[in-house]
Amino acid sequence: MKNLIIQKGTDTPFVSLDPANNVFDFKGDSYSQDPNEFYAPIIEWFQEFLSQNKRPITVNFHFTYFNTPTYRPMMEILQMLEQHHVTKKIPLSINWYANTQDVDMMNDAKFLDSNFDHLDIKILPA
């Protein structure tokens, strides 16, 4: 499977999906008014990738800001990862990097973590 690299836009994050190393990075801001359009190819990529993957996965979120509409595609990605982790017994590391002074971003990470029974979102200093 090929890498998916999406350069940072005005209101969209840099995305690097590297199946050779099974490391997936999201960096920057995500506040597009139509995040579904931006995240659709990412979700499709993950669907194909997860159907084939048998190795441990690391996902790194380095968001500095994301808006409420971004929650939906993020939740969809995290749900797919959780299902893969549970059904295939594949190790999964999810790292959420946030400025410890950014209370909103820290709370967002805790909120996301609380929505999943089988994901452990590690909140780490940015």
Image: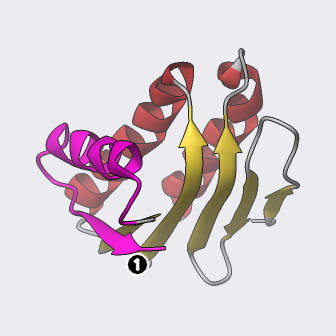
Q: Would residue 54 be seen by someone viewing this image from the given angle?
A: no
Secondary structure at numbered mark 1: loop
Residue at 48% in and 37% down: 74
Q: Which residue is mark 1?
A: 56
Determine if the magenta segment contains residue 55: no
| Residue range corresponding to the magenta coloring | 100-126
Left or right: residue 103 versus residue 25 is left
Give the number of callouts: 1
Query: Within 10 Å of the Cα at label 1, are there few (<14), some (14-19), or many (20+) other Cα atoms?
Result: some
Where does the image place residue 20, in percent across and percent down from the top left? Answer: 68, 81
- The residue closer to the viewer here, 34 or 11, is 11
Above or below, 120 against 103 in this view is: below
Q: Residue at x 47, y 24 (%)?
A: 72
Query: Which is nearer the eye, 101 or 94?
Result: 101
In screen coordinates, is 7 left or right of 81? right
Q: Compared with residue 30, is residue 22 higher up or lower down, i.e. above or below?
A: below
Q: Position of residue 55 (x, y in %)?
A: 44, 78
- Image quarter in which the N terminus is found: bottom right
